Image (spheres, helix red, strand yellow):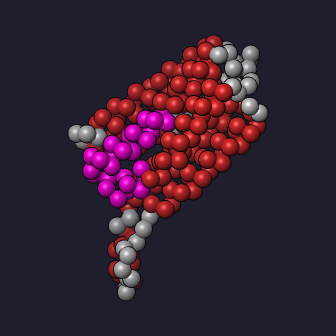
Amino acid sequence: MNKSRFEAFSDGVFAFAITLLVLGFSLPAERLTSNHSLAVALLAQWPSLIAYALSFAVIGIMWQNHHALFRRVARVDRATVYWNLLLLAGTAFIPFATSTLGRYPTMTASTFLYGLALSETATCYNVMLRHLARSGLFEPSVSDATIATTIRAYTTGWITYAAATLLALVLPVASFAAYIVIAVYYLIPRGVDSDHA
């Protein structure tokens, strides 16, 4: 597949998913009749705001890392397209999981669902990364050490997302906090994703 088309399609899905996040905000169905009631309703949106900020960061980081990764890939094969489509499917689901998390931030089902969405994207990213390495699809200038560093960094994320998802079954609020910590960790690019790789 033409790499430019591959990246353009991926960019479009990331942009669409990040735009849909704002739909997680909603005011009460009945018309509010005073400034005070509107202010109270707006302030009640704070869990949705935190979930929105978290997911905006998550999708933004995924997009940046995806761009940085494929900048160092020489060519794209059918298996890469397959794993990338599964990654994008999970990304497109994040707005729904975010909306659910924002409305029910302390419930097991919502934090577990959010963790499943992030774990699915982490799984696809890791499998795709390993496929790229195993198939020799990186540019010759990318060293084995850089690839190994990248795989270690994203394996760590994979494991921590899975752990945070399981944590949701017993401590939903702690799980929510863990998702935030993981997002902060990935603000710093590593390995192939780094500008200095």
Q: Closest to the observer: 9 or 70?
A: 9
> In the picture provided, is 12 more to the left or to the right than 162?
right
Residue at 70% across, 27% down = 76
Position above or below: 156 against 8? above
Vertically, is 80 above or below 10? above
* Residue that protrudes farthest toward the top in the picture: 144
Main SS of residues in magenta:
helix
Foreground: 9 or 162? 9
Q: Which residues are magenta?
A: 97-122
Q: Residue 120 colored magenta?
A: yes
Residue 102 location (% of width, % of height): 38, 56
Would residue 126 be found to the left or right of residue 116 on screen? right
The quadrant the N terminus occupies is top right
The residue shown at (52%, 31%) is 124
- Residue 61 on the magenta segment: no
Identify the residue at horizontal 25%, vertical 39% (top origin). Answer: 169
Vertical position of residue 155 compared to residue 175: above or below: above
| 90 lies above or below 37 | above
Residue 27 horizontal side relative to residue 193, left or right: left
Q: Going by the picture, which residue comes out furthest to the left?
A: 170
Whether residue 105 appears in this view of the structure is yes
Residue 138 place in picture, x, y as percent: 69, 20
The residue at 52%/50% (across/down) is 56
Quadrant (top left, top right, bottom left, bottom right) of the C terminus: top right
Q: Quadrant of residue 188?
A: top right
**One can see residue 65 in this view:** no
Nearer to me, 43 or 165: 165
Q: Residue 177's spot in the image, x, y percent?
A: 35, 43
Residue 159 % position (x, y): 40, 27
Count of numbered tags:
0
Q: Quadrant of residue 149?
A: top right
